[in-house]
Amino acid sequence: MKLSKAQYDEIAQFLGHVQPTRQSLRKLKERFPGQSQSTLLSIFSQEYQKQIKRTHAKHHTAEAIETYYQRYLNGVMKNAAAPVLLELANEVDFAPSLMARIVLERFLQEQEGAVPTKTLINSMLRDPSQIPDGVLANQVYQCTVNDCCYGPLVDCIKHAIGHEHEVLLREMLLEKNLSFLAEEQLRAKGYDKTPDFILEVPVAVEGHIIHWIESKASFGDECSHQAYLHDQFWSYWNRFGPGLVIYWYGFIEELDCHRDRGILLKDCFPTDIVTLRHSMAQH
């Protein structure tokens, strides 16, 4: 699913005016019925994460943390069963899982008299039954299950989806009888930054030679694509030559502008792969 920059901007603009909830996702689907659900979900998640990054600092001032903690304590004193933390997160426009993290950290600091480790907090967010206060454990649990863009549950889902698409790509390569080295084999050989698959015999796709393929189970927007180019794709290109990136949930068409330099974008597995054996047989 390729979108023009204008189509993408229209979706992003719509998302700028709604809360990051499941209801908003339904509205998004109604507003853009022509787009696939997974593409919209990926854009929804990425746009929300950008918004959170922009406002992250203001929620982490000492003053904000203290305010949230006191509001949490007052709220549960009135009614321990009410979703105090979740409502507070929605009210101040912050991700519920991140709000739970702030309050949990502040609570543990008060209990232990020292700043808790990141490992401990992550472990408690993953399994709130470890939290030594039943009320807070329940509040944290409500936040993580109702957060559609952040938190341990979302991380698990993203990881599983990413893995699923890599497995899918591996099966497609095997089906085409293409010999390749997978990321884990390359790591074992001592490579640090590696694409998902390196083709042992290069192929041609749409007239471009391809040495490697990277699978991205997300939508390629400008922000994430620039980051990937900088952190991953150009270093793969330097090391292994030209390659192909598959954004399974689509991308902004205008970003596919590095073909001549050796980075090709697709939104599915290419159907017109030409192998070198193939072309040699024709000569």
Image (cartoon, helix red, strand yellow):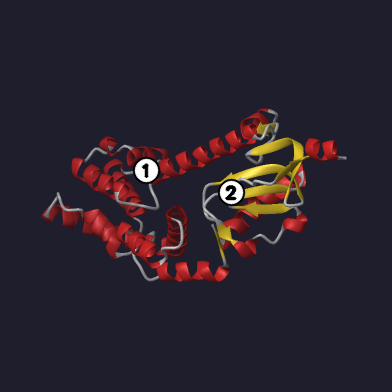
Q: Is residue 25 above or below residue 113?
A: below
Say the numbered circle drawn on residue 153.
1
Q: Amino acid at mark 1?
A: Leu
Please state if 22 lies on the left or on the right of 255 as rendered: left
- Label 1 or label 2, whichever lies nearer to me, is 2
Query: Residue pushed farthest front?
Result: 282
User: Which of disc 2 and disc 1 is earlier in sequence?
Assistant: 1
Residue drawn where x is 66% and y is 28% of the image: 188
Q: Position of residue 124 (x, y in %)?
A: 33, 39
Q: Are marks 1 and 2 in contact (CB under 8 Å)?
A: no
Q: Amino acid at mark 2?
A: Cys
Residue 111 found in image quarter: top left
Nearer to the camera, 89 or 14: 14
Q: Is residue 239 above or below residue 175?
A: below
Residue drawn where x is 54% and y is 49% of the image: 248
* Residue 42 visible, this orientation: yes
* Residue 118 visible, this orientation: no
Say the numbered circle drawn on residue 268.
2
Residue 92 found in image quarter: bottom left
Q: Residues within 10 Å of mark 2 (few under 14, many from 20)?
A: some
